[in-house]
Amino acid sequence: MLAGGGARRLGGADKPGLRVGGRALLDRVLGACSGAGTTVVVAAPRATSRPVVWAREEPAGAGPLAALEAGLRRTGAEHVVVLSADLPFLEERTVRSLLAALRESGADGAVLSDPGGRDQPLVAAYRGVSLKRGIAQLAAEHGGLTGLPLRRLTARLELTRVADPLASFDCDTWDDIAAARARIREHGHVLDEWISAVKDELGIELDVDTSLLLDLARDAAHGVARPAAPLTTFLVGYAAARAAGGPEAVAEATRKAAALAVRWAEEGGSDAGPGEKPGAAPGNADTPGNADAPGKPDTPGGKPNATPGANPPGAAPGANPPSTTPGANPPGAAPDPGQNARDDMRPDAG
């Protein structure tokens, strides 16, 4: 991977370190070639999301051909994938497609072509021996490799092409960076991008069926309570980790938690016991004339019912009970001179 350019069109910014979707461009490209036996990055060493082998062209800044030669000195692989560090949408499937095309074609290399049909020699898979032979010839002809463009080498090679308009998108300008950042926030991409960013940040390479986890989160939120969704998915992940399993362990823990959420929801929809009406309080017998508290039927000698409007025992029939309204004057008492003022301050006063 060549990651030591000057980024002149970005004003000399540290292009491999620029972030798209929360991840450095260099880390995004490293994620696409995680299956490589050896990953060599030609640049000054820096923190990366996974271990790599560092190399440097001599002298530093001598150009892409010199950088490629420095990287090839660190690997003896038969097939070599050559990438730049500014490809925000490169995925592992594209790398696999390039390697498959190289093996099937018998050519020296398989390069990605952009929407305009132009070759992208820094998104390509090559036969290691073909690269080394061509570089040695160029070095002998020019007395070195400093300043030589990469096309001097690719012009000597037999190439096959693989079309992938999205994967070939590279970030050379600030407008390119802005376009890449905008695209990953589009509705159809944001979830996959977020999952990839989290996995990268946590150092996780496990691939799981996110649709299963989303279904589980939905069932937990609807059948239990909304906060149950993130907590349940966390516990599923923890259980899978405790089991030291891969995607199968996650799927099994998800299945168990989903079944529990269904059982939980079913109980909530049928909470009545035998002989009870749904929603009835336990012990509340439907007995005619039982107007008291549940479970307390009228019994001889019990307390009389407190019927609204009934006269207290011993009161004359038809007599009204004394008023217990706060602030009311007893019968025959002189009017309170401040009562009118207090009435005016009541919320319901006209």
Image: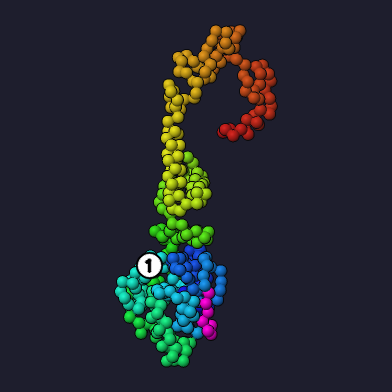
Q: Amino acid at mark 1?
A: Arg
Q: Position of residue 25 (x, y in %)?
A: 48, 69
Q: Residue furthest left?
A: 105
> Is residue 336 left or right of 35 when viewed as pictured?
right
**Residue hosting label 1:** 96
In the picture, residue 113 is in which quadrant?
A: bottom left
Taking depth in this image into account, of 5 and 53 the one nearest to the observer is 53
Q: Secondary structure at mark 1?
A: helix
What is the crowding at mark 1: few (fewer than 14 residues within 10 Å), some, or many (at least 20)?
A: some
Residue 271 lies within the magenta run: no
Which residue occupies 51% across, 44% down? 227
Q: Position of residue 238 (x, y in %)?
A: 52, 49
Which residue occupies 33% across, 80% down? 158
- Magenta part, dominant SS: loop
Q: Position of residue 135 (x, y in %)?
A: 42, 84
Taking depth in this image into account, of 183 and 136 the one nearest to the observer is 136
Q: Quadrant of the C terminus?
A: top right
Q: What's drawn in magenta, residue-wise?
A: 54-61
In the picture, residue 349 is in which quadrant?
A: top right
Taking depth in this image into account, of 335 and 310 the one nearest to the observer is 310
Q: Position of residue 225 (x, y in %)?
A: 49, 41
Which residue occupies 35% across, 82% down? 157
